[in-house]
Amino acid sequence: MSQIFISYKREDELRVSRLVAALERAGRSVWWDRGLAGGENWRNQIQGALDAAKCVIVVWTHESVGPAGDFVRDEAAQAKRRGVLAPVKLDKVEPPLGFGEIQAIDLTSWKGSSRDPFFQDLLAAVDAKLEGRTVPAAKGPMKRLMRRLTYSSAASALLLCSVAFGSNLWRLQDHMCGGPVFQPYISDACGALGLGDRPAKEERIAWATREPGSCAGLRLHIERFPKGAYRAEATSLLAARRPTQFEVWTPMRRRLALFQPQEYPASSSEVKAKSVALASAQGRAERLCRGFAATTSFRLRSAAPEAEKWSCDSGGAGVVCAFEGEAVCELDERGLVENDTCGK
């Protein structure tokens, strides 16, 4: 059984799984109750693992320090009595009453890196518990302080540069924002800061990908970026909009009454006679459909006869058939759509 036990609240399982994975990548074997089978001995299994552990990592969160965190606090109390408690914080919370004297390792800003100084403090605490040594002083808080001091010094220098840049001293904005180097990244940064009349990245992409000539697209752009770098150009293009018309052809079907008379010579069977009648009716169907489409509003794609009521006669010469039906016309109907065009 693993010598490291993790006590946590079930609602924090996803975050705790990241911690477990990081510990295992660092070569530490961890026991926790994820995937533990239910049954009568469920609690006994947990108690057995807790008793056998030489280090108990207790995870303090909003959930575990709250009213529903009884089990976590009970397991923490047992670990504290045995001197194997190693508490960590995943949320900015105060440990429950009775646990404040043991400094919890602050993992509230931990992103999962094994090189994080606070995670390294946890590894050092775990190893000390496993080996029965005194837990060494945490190094993470001092490293965080030094990092903040470094950032503060850098920020001061950056502030001086920013004052000169923001006042456009020596035309720095013009040279920097519109220069040829590291574009469009520099221009995007200037746009985000409202400098140099440059568009921010989101506006630049929206302007480049808008539908060419679309007045609606320009209106939407002004609505999304009311103070954007392209507002004046968009307004100018809208003012110069011009109406346009274009044709659209819509597929349609029209049925026209069709009569096919008996035609000779006769056929040897009724099936063949019907086939002959349909073939003869093809020309009639095409003439009917062509006549219907003989305007600028339609164009004919195809025509076909369709029989509905047959009349067949047989005699010594064979069988002849006539039918009443329809000419089925497949057409495109012309329409005009009006639209406003703004720019190219």
Image (spheres, grey):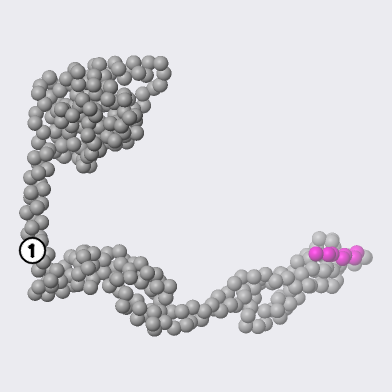
Q: Quadrant of residue 260?
A: bottom right
Residue drawn at (36%, 71%), measured in percent from left and top?
222
Which residue matches tag 1?
Answer: 160
Q: Quadrant of residue 146?
A: top left
The answer to whether residue 156 of the structure is visible from this angle is yes
Q: Quadrant of residue 48?
A: top left
Q: Which residues are magenta?
A: 308-314
Residue 125: x percent and y percent?
14, 28
Q: Is residue 110 above or below residue 163?
A: above
Residue 7: x percent and y percent?
27, 26
Task: Tell me the element at label 1.
Answer: helix
97 or 208, nearer to the observer: 97
167 or 248, nearer to the observer: 167
Residue 103: x percent and y percent?
15, 30
Q: Is residue 274 left or right of residue 170?
A: right
Residue 132: x percent and y percent?
12, 19
- Residue 103 is inside the magenta segment: no
The answer to whether residue 281 of the structure is visible from this angle is no
Q: Is residue 91 above or below residue 233?
A: above
238 or 286, nearer to the observer: 238
256 or 137, nearer to the observer: 137
The dominant secondary structure in magenta is: strand
Q: Is residue 163 left or right of residue 235?
A: left
Residue drawn at (24%, 36%), measured in percent from left and top?
93
Q: Is residue 176 above or below residue 52?
A: below
In the rendered structure, which amino acid carries the disc numbered 1? Leu
Residue drawn at (43%, 73%), measured in percent from left and top?
216
Residue neighbourhood size for the residue with mark 1, other residues' Cα within 10 Å, grouped as few (<14), some (14–19), many (≥20):
few
Q: How many marks?
A: 1
Residue drawn at (11%, 33%), measured in percent from left and top?
138
